[in-house]
Image (cartoon, rainbow, N blue to C red):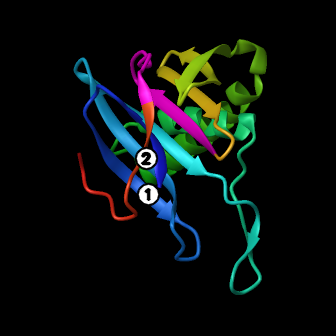
Amino acid sequence: MRALVPVSDPWSVDGSGRTDDGPVDDLSVRAERDGGSYSVRTLRLTGVRLGPRGSVHGVVTDPVATAALAIGSLLLSAIPAGLPGDRTRAAMAAAEARAQELAADRPAWDVSALPLDGIDYALFTRTLPEGAVAHADLGWAVVALWSTGPLPRGPFHLLEIPDEPVPR
């Protein structure tokens, strides 16, 4: 799968997914920078399809949904390990509600350029007390980024990663 990865920072594949045993259409990398780490998730747009039993498959990739994915990922990573089950579920529900609220507040997002292959894509960024988040729509895919520290400024590039990726 073609995915957004950092040019200079060491990175490794953190997870991938596919729909209906097809090719990988969702890939996450984790990168290291200045003693911290950040994550970049690329979701290939596959359209809304019918599965083998007539079930509908698709990924919601509008700006608010992609922003909520980035924010939710950051907030979920901040939930302390070892909480009792009911407190963990409550923290997860609170993180999801807050992610939706912050994602929908579009005027609070800054916009800068994400240069890729000679095109400046709009990169929407936002700083939160827990860290920083960003998202972009590349046309054929959307990307979500999150970090417990400042977001890296790049550079990034698009790289074809095999369906059975090997850590880099």
Residue at figure coordinates x 50%, y 32% from the top left: 145
Disc 2 is placed on an element classified as strand
Extreme-bottom residue of the structure: 53
Q: Which residue is mark 1?
A: 16
Which is nearer the eye, 139 or 152? 139
Which is nearer the eye, 57 or 149? 57
Q: Which residues are magenta?
A: 141-156
Q: Is residue 64 above or below residue 134?
A: below
Q: Is residue 147 magenta?
A: yes
Q: Is residue 152 above or below residue 76?
A: above
- Earlier in the chain: of badge 2 and badge 1, it is 1
Question: What is the spatial separation of the Cα atoms under label 2 and label 1, in whole angstroms?
Answer: 6 Å
Q: Label 1 is placed on what type of residue?
A: Ser
- Residue 60: give its label: none
- Residue 28: give its label: 2
Q: Label 2 is placed on what type of residue?
A: Ser
How far across and how far down the image is residue 104, in percent? 76, 28
